[in-house]
Amino acid sequence: MEQEKIAFLEEKARALRVSIVKTLHKSQSGHTGGSLSAIDMVTALYFHTMRHDPENPGWEERDRFILSKGHAAPAQYVTLAEAGYFPKEDLMMLRRLGSHLQGHPDSKGTPGVEVCTGSLGQGLSMANGMALGLRLDNSRSRIYVLLGDGELQEGQVWEAVMSAAHYRLDNLCAMVDANGLQIDGEVKKVMNVGPIGDKFRAFGWHVIEIDGHDMAAITGALESAERTKGKPTVIVASTVKGKGVPRFEHKASYHGVAPNDEELNEALICLGCFED
Amino acid sequence: MKATRDAYGETLAQLGEQDRDIVVLDADLSGSTKTAVFAKKFPDRFFNMGIAEANMVGTAAGLAAVGKVPFVSTFAIFAAGRAWEQIRQSVAYPKANVKIVPTHGGVTVGEDGGSHQSVEDIAIMRAIPNMTVIVPADALETREAVKAAAAHKGPVYIRLGRNKVPEIFNDDYRFAIGKGCELASGNDMTFISTGLMTAQAVQAAALLGKEGISARVVHMATIKPLDQEIVLKAARETKAIVTAEEHSVIGGLGSAVAELLAEQQPTPIKRAGIHDRFGTSGKADELIKYFGLTPDDLAEAARELLGRK
């Protein structure tokens, strides 16, 4: 892909990181680390890969995105707002009573959210169902689903991994935001899920392993997934929890903690907000 | 005599012809749940999900999210029990248009024993917001309930049974979700029953009739939303209620009726059902006796209640 497009996506992701920390600072509740690790992939999906129409969220031929690791909702919300699904002012109501921006994605209220997630391990099953249903309709729409690496500890995920390969769902692409951390610490110490790629390969998936913050690698992997026929693709993306703000990086303690005033200020400096 | 699950398989196959959006999922029990009848006719729209109920329910939610009308079947214990949180999160919370229709509900599953006899499913389904819960009494009502569920937008749980059950209704019957049905008039007491217990209640009312006790029978196919009007009317007019269900007395029809009466029309009530126990192996008719669910048991409950009046 041309350098210009990559630079455009990188700048989008930077701006969305700013939006994530501002949104979480305002709500004083929510998941900072996993939103920042996932945002590069979410950016690539909404501003490059997916066919979708923010003016018409129900457009039948759209590609669909499911955030199976629903606690990274801020990453999806800021992206949907940036794309134009709803006003950016709504972000300041995150997690407030009466807001459509629930703590975890809720398809009943938020334009652009396809299903309800938040209880881990269920998104891939729903993605499979969408892929099966759209294939019945001979639709060319594709389904993208983002999981966490800690989430892979849920048994239902492996039922769904088995099922997607069995039904040869090549209109489905799963992405694993492998930031290596979960609430209680390192994934490999809490309950090792590795080697992730080998496990998916053994189940019959096409596996692509990338750096989840390398925009060219992300878009390239998504294109490779689209070309892959006869089996589902998983992009196992190595990421850094809290990416972009050194104070938050590699820290399980920022899993479910929103930035305070000082942390917000530091984050905005790190994200290049005061350079001019 | 016909099993409700047989009526289900036939009705699904009929509906499949009329509506191309109907899809069916099963977890390796399609021969028992009778979804195999649909599978044979519409192989492209039938998905065997293997022995993996949680994923089956999630997959159904995804199918519903792209406009399909999924029917999901397995045994009641695995549908409601194993996949409870998937039903809550992926189906009921988003109001997904998924129909969960398990067979082999209750103790009349028989020989397979307590591991396979779901006596809690109505309670745990009823507790979930947005969920409709239906327990048909016979084959004809099953057919009508399945059609009504297909036409209804949103999650529905229909509990079916394993064994042949007597016919209660004829072709004139008009089923509606949320409506109870008076099968016998009476003024001394009322049986409010669901599922196969309605046939037992009708017989119990006949036994009482011979003793000069005039018993009303209300069949309550829909446990949620409950037909409050028919319950309150029975309470006002007969002043004694015996509920009957092939399910725990905790959380099912008996609880639903007792909750309503306690708040709006305090009335003497007895709940016939499974009293906080698991099932056990045996023949279906032996188990009905063992758990105190025969017409004689129901009639005795009515006599005791009338003694307190």
Image (cartoon, coloured by chain):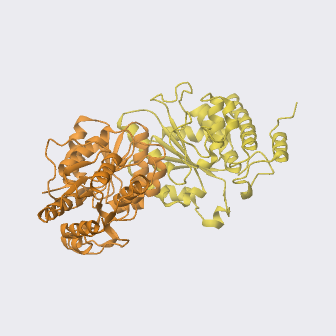
Chain colours: A yellow, B orange
B143 on left or right of B58: left
The total number of labels drawn is 0
| x and y percentages locating residue A111 in the rendered image | 55, 33
The x, y position of residue B219, in whole percent, is 25, 53
- Answer whether residue A4 is visible to the viewer in this image: yes
Give the side of residue A178 with respect to residue B174, left or right. right
The foreground one among B285 and B31 is B285
Identify the residue at horizontal 17%, vertical 60% (top origin): B205
Q: Nearer the viewer, residue B30 or B202?
A: B202
Whether A63 is drawn above or below B295: the answer is above
Quadrant in which the C terminus of chain A is drawn? top right
Residue ranking furthest to the top? A55
Q: Residue at x 70, y 36 (%)?
A: A92
Q: In x, y percent, where is residue A239?
A: 68, 50
Q: Is residue A188 above or below residue A34?
A: below
Q: Is residue B142 left or right of residue B156?
A: left
User: Which is nearer the eye, B3 or A55?
Assistant: B3
Q: Is residue A243 found left or right of B118 in the rendered image?
A: right
- On the question of residue B47 being in view, the answer is no
Q: Position of residue B82 (x, y in %)?
A: 41, 61
Return the residue found at the far right: A276
Which quarter of the figure is the N terminus of chain A placed in? top right
